[in-house]
Image (cartoon, helix red, strand yellow):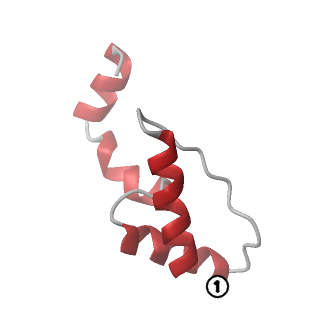
Amino acid sequence: MNEADAAAWDAGGYVILPQLTMTGPIEEVSASIRKLIDNGATEIQFQPAGKDIPREIDRFMTAARQA
């Protein structure tokens, strides 16, 4: 994180992470996807990040299939 990002995080920015993103164990991501589907979503945009993109894609697809 850059200096501004770190300051925002330290000021409590991390609190909104679950409200704005789908992060966490597969079960939580799957539940978030299910909520979107139940509310009428027909598409989900996914942006993998990190050092192991294939792993991120695999985990997301596992969560999506469980939804």
Which quadrant, please, contains the C terminus? Answer: bottom right
* Residue type indicated by callout 1: Asp
41 relative to 59 in the view: left or right: right
Q: Count all numbered tags in the image, as a single digit.
A: 1
Q: Mark 1, residues whose alpha carbon is within 10 Å: few (<14), some, or many (≥20)?
A: few
Task: Give the vertical position of 46 relative to 32 (above or below).
Answer: above
Residue drawn at x 55%, y 64% is: 61
Residue receiving disc 1 = 38
> Among all residues in the image, which is located at the extreme left?
10
**Residue at the image point whose x is 62% and y is 74% from the top:** 36
Residue at (62, 51) in percent of width and height: 46
Q: Is residue 36 left or right of residue 58?
A: right
The residue lying toward the viewer, choosing from 4 and 31, is: 31
Element marked by disc 1: helix
Residue placed at 49% from the left, 70% from the top? 63
Instruction: Tell me residue 31's x, y (percent).
Output: 46, 77
Q: Residue furthest top?
A: 3
The quarter of the picture where the N terminus appears is top left
Q: Is residue 19 left or right of residue 36?
A: left
Residue 10 lies in what quarter of the image?
top left
Q: Is residue 28 above or below residue 49?
A: below
Give 59 or 21, whichever is nearer the viewer.
59
As drawn, which residue projects farthest toward the bottom?
A: 38
Q: Position of residue 50 (x, y in %)?
A: 42, 35
